[in-house]
Image (cartoon, rainbow, N blue to C red):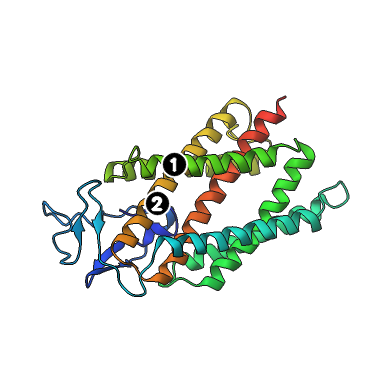
């Protein structure tokens, strides 16, 4: 099962010599769909792996412990490092890049520039065959600068409590999806994957069209970023982010089960960070609309 996350969309955990590695076949970003690497046309999808055993409770593949294999502790540690970098640079940019009337243009320009640099780093890492911790942490640092400027602007001009609400909302979505996934209330199947991919493609295309209309026509384009439609699309964006989390959890679970190399935990951390940034931005936008209407 490949994730809709831009990082995981081109790397599916596969069984190679009895353990998992990331399939490096390139895909066209988050919009690319891939076949389920476990569907091999056999009644038992794990039969081709002589080392994997079937978990009778959840049906998840189980692989023997292997030296140098990725563990959940590795994923948690790398994710904490990556998210910690985002939070640190966001706090620094909030403090050092004021968004008052005199400095708003300059600070906003630096924030947008940092977002573009982070986007380039993310694309480069997504197409690399191996994880680059330096590149991933650099992405996190520049992404944090952008988030710090945006968050400071929202806090200054809309509502001081909006940012904390967005942070808490993001944490609640993460915790809720994690609990639902562990309890098997969410089952990641090929149908689930296909639905999420189709919805994500439609969402992104609509946002691109709205952006074009806003650039050439002025205002809010088609109205997808404000008012009733803005609220609706904000909710849809958060739901999509929650679905991305479920796909990412599945990807990590399969990688650990099949003994993916430990360095791949950086890719897991990178993908989870991308998804959490998506959810935070959509949450921030939704709450900005709601609080701005008060």
- Disc 2 designates what residue? 249
Label whose residue precedes the other's in the sequence (1 or 2): 1
**CB within 8 Å, label 1 to label 2:** yes
Q: Is residue 253 left or right of residue 167?
A: left
Circle 2 packing at 10 Å, graded few (<14), some (14-19), many (20+), is: many
Q: Residue at x 73, y 52 (%)?
A: 149
Between 172 and 55, the residue placed more toward the observer is 55
Q: Secondary structure under badge 2?
A: helix
Q: Is residue 151 left or right of residue 281?
A: right
Determine which quarter of the picture holds residue 197: top left
On residue 205, the disc is none
Q: Residue at x 78, y 38 (%)?
A: 157
**In x, y percent, where is residue 34?**
30, 55
Q: Is residue 219 left or right of residue 247?
A: right
Q: Residue furthest right?
A: 102
Residue 88 in sight:
yes
Circle 1 packing at 10 Å, graded few (<14), some (14-19), many (20+), is: some
Q: Residue at x 23, y 46 (%)?
A: 57
Between 180 and 57, the residue placed more toward the observer is 57
Q: Quadrant of the C terminus?
A: top right
Check the image and report above or below for 236 versus 142: above
**In x, y percent, where is residue 23?**
32, 66
Check the image and report above or below for 172 versus 40: above
On residue 177, the disc is 1
Q: Is residue 254 left or right of residue 74?
A: left
Q: Residue at x 48, y 59 (%)?
A: 76
**In x, y percent, where is residue 93?**
74, 57
**In x, y percent, where is residue 155?**
75, 41
Residue 200 in sight:
no
Q: Residue furthest bottom?
A: 67
Q: Secondary structure under badge 1?
A: helix
């Amino acid at each position: 099962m490949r994730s809709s996350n831009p990082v995981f969309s081109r790397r599916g955990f596969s069984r190679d010599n009895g353990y998992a590695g990331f399939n490096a076949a390139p895909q066209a970003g988050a919009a690319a769909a891939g076949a389920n690497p476990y569907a091999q046309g056999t009644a038992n999808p794990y039969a081709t792996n002589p080392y994997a055993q079937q978990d009778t409770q959840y049906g998840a593949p189980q692989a023997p412990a292997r030296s140098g294999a990725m563990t959940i502790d590795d994923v948690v540690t790398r994710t904490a490092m990556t998210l910690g970098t985002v939070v640190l640079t966001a706090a620094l940019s909030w403090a050092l890049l004021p968004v008052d009337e005199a400095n708003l243009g300059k600070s906003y320009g630096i924030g947008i520039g940092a977002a573009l640099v982070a986007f380039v780093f993310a694309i480069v890492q997504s197409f690399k065959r191996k994880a680059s911790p330096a590149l991933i942490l650099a992405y996190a640092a520049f992404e944090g600068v952008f988030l710090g400027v945006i968050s400071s602007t929202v806090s200054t001009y809309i509502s001081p409590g909006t940012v904390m609400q967005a942070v808490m909302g993001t944490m609640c979505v993460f915790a809720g999806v994690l609990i639902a996934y562990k309890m098997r209330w969410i089952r990641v199947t090929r149908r689930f994957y296909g639905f999420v991919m189709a919805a994500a493609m439609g969402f992104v295309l609509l946002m691109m069209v709205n952006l074009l209309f806003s650039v050439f026509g002025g205002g809010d384009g088609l109205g997808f970023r404000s008012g009733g439609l803005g609220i609706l699309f904000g909710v849809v964006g958060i739901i999509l982010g929650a679905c991305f989390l479920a796909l990412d959890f599945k990807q990590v679970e399969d990688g650990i089960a099949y003994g993916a190399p430990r360095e791949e935990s950086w890719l897991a951390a990178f993908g989870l960070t991308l998804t959490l940034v998506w959810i935070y931005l959509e949450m921030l936008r939704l709450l900005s609309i709601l609080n701005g209407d008060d």
